[in-house]
Image (tube, rainbow, N blue to C red):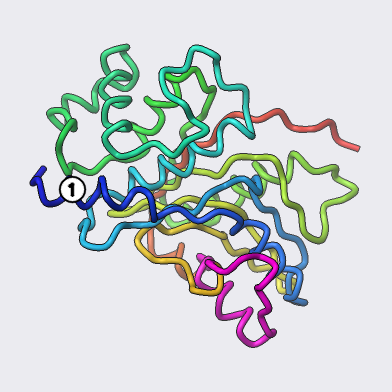
Amino acid sequence: MPERVASVLHEGEASNALHGVINKLAGLLQQDEDVEVAYLCTASAVQVYKVRNEGGNFCGYRNMQMLCHSLPSTTAVPSNAPVDLTEKLNIFQIQDLIEAAWDAGHNCHGRVQTGGIKGTRKHIGTSEAEAVLLYLGIPCTGSVYAGKEAWHDLLDAVEAYYSTTVPTSARSGLHVTKCPPIFLQRPKHSITIVGIERRRSGKRTLLAFDPAYFPPGVMREPAADVKIHTWRAKYVLAQYQKSERYLKKYNQFETLMVDIKPIEPC
């Protein structure tokens, strides 16, 4: 990795994370009368985005930062975890974790495929994210969705993941759950799923943090100062939506979901 890029990454880590976005998204969804039901991940989720001039190689790392940072508030993190997950990990810490996970035998085919990633700009994806969670002792499940209906199967899986933590009798309206976000890999890019909405028309839309884009300016304002009129609310919400039309462009997806305990049906 060139020293210039390493310097950009080090200097940018203090300014590329945004807290409180989930609660603001919840407010936007409540304003939308076309939403029949919506599920969001834990309110503690942090939106992490690229640093200016870092290039296009680090989306996988940004998504791992978001997933790992949510773990202390959503799952039991082993007390002997080698890193403090209450703090945002930097890219170099994640590279160390991936290498350590491979050393421990988790998805070590990744090392063969990449030749190692420490100190490089090589892309990482679902396999490396899963290796890190397993190394940290976090139960998780990786899944692949392929074919013409991959988009539909993905939406089904995401809706099931979040809705199983909500009583059946309450599955309408808006729900901010205690679930972590989901790592999503699609061809040539990865994003972090933070929720899903079902509209009255029956169409579903993923809600996601895409590290390739900076958050809308209004989302950076203190929550008490955020006043968004209906016409603008739809525009801001659209920055976080991945529609069925968008998903249909791709015939393969991979997800990594932290295992959660569904509630008993009622």
15 left or right of 236 in image = left
Q: Which residue is mark 1?
A: 7
Does residue 136 lie above or below 174 as drawn? above
Residue drawn at (18%, 42%) of the image: 122
The residue at the far bottom in this view is: 231
The spot of residue 207 in percent (x, y) is 57, 60
The spot of residue 121 in percent (x, y) is 17, 44
Instruction: Specify whether residue 236 is painted magenta.
Output: yes
As helix, strand or loop, the secondary structure at mark 1 comes to helix
Residue drawn at (55%, 56%) of the image: 152
- Judge the density around disc 1: few (<14), some (14-19), many (≥20) Cα neighbours within 10 Å: few
81 left or right of 233 in image = left
Instruction: Specify whether residue 222 is painted magenta.
Output: yes
54 left or right of 47 in image = left
Picture quarter with the C terminus: top right
**Callout count:** 1
Picture quarter with the N terminus: top left
Looking at the picture, tell me which residue is in the foreground, 224 or 179. Answer: 224
Residue drawn at (42%, 41%) of the image: 65
The spot of residue 258 in percent (x, y) is 55, 32
Q: What span is in magenta?
A: 220-243
The spot of residue 16 in percent (x, y) is 39, 55
Q: Quadrant location of residue 164? A: top right
Does residue 84 lie above or below 8 as drawn? above
The residue at the far left in this view is: 2
Does residue 265 lie above or below 14 as drawn? above
Residue drawn at (46%, 62%) of the image: 247
Task: Name which residue type carries label 1.
Answer: Ser
